[in-house]
Amino acid sequence: MTNNPNESPSISEPDPRELFARLGEESFWRIARAFYARIAVDQLLRPIFPNELEEPIRNQAEFLIQYFGGPEAYSIRKGHPRLRMRHHPYSIGVAERNAWVAAMTGALEDAQIPQPDRTVMNRYFANTATFLMNRDE
Ligand code: HEM
């Protein structure tokens, strides 16, 4: 027994790298397609993204597959993700960050990602989107 709840296996959350084996590759393509279907109609974010969304769908799907423990197709094709550097060209303030997170939260619903994995993903996205902000307001 322990008094520290973080040491209790029953309430510990899955390691992000376990998600690929459990969810399977197709789930990540469903997430990427659902995410960009939302970006395509997002008034704030649509203008920031390229006209053609096929390549962004592939970038996002392969990145997520790799991050959540699957094959490293993203890095084989594009090198180290370097997310801060790759987002440098885009102006990301709190409104853009929140709109991105809302689109991805909706995409996880659209793709019917089950719990507890959905919570693990939402936490990763919320934290990373904050880390990628490069404008003060
Ligand atoms: C959890 C947060 C995020 C993750 C994991 C993420 C991930 C990625 C990845 C992997 C790429 C492809 C980069 C490449 O290979 O060149 C990308 C591109 C991009 N991201 Fe993000 N991003 C996040 C947040 C944001 C936010 C908050 C914005 C701002 C609105 C944003 C805007 C863009 C744009 C405009 C592109 C270019 C589309 C492309 O060429 O693929 N991202 N992002």
Image (tube, rainbow, N blue to C red):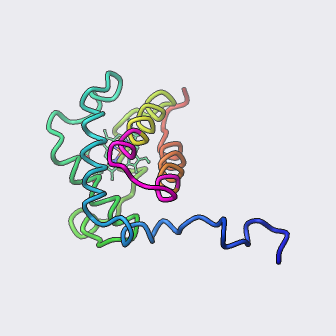
Residue found 40% across the figure and 65% down from its top: 68
| Horizontal side of residue 134 vs 89, given as left or right | right
Relative depth, front residue between 112 and 51: 112
Q: In the image, which residues are magenta? A: 106-119
Relative depth, front residue between 29 and 76: 29
Query: In the picture shown, does residue 128 fall above or below 22?
Result: above
| Horizontal side of residue 112 vs 2, given as left or right | left
Relative depth, front residue between 45 and 6: 6
Relative depth, front residue between 111 and 41: 111
Locate residue 66, reporting x and y percent: 34, 66
Numbered label tally:
0
Residue found 39% across the figure and 57% down from its top: 82
Quadrant position of ligand 1: top left
| Horizontal side of residue 98 vs 9, given as left or right | left
Query: In the picture shown, does residue 7 fall above or below 50?
Result: below
Asked if residue 109 is among those painted magenta in the image, a careful observer would answer: yes
Quadrant assignment for the C terminus: top right
Residue found 45% across the figure and 39% down from its top: 101
Quadrant assignment for the N terminus: bottom right
Locate residue 70, reporting x and y percent: 33, 71
Which residue of the protein is positioned furthest toward the bottom in this rendering? 1
Locate residue 26, reporting x and y percent: 25, 60
| Horizontal side of residue 44 vs 18, given as left or right | left
Which residue of the protein is positioned furthest toward the right in this rendering? 3
Which residue of the protein is positioned furthest toward the top in this rendering? 43
Asked if residue 115 is among those painted magenta in the image, a careful observer would answer: yes
Residue found 29% across the figure and 52% down from its top: 60
Locate residue 32, reporting x and y percent: 28, 49
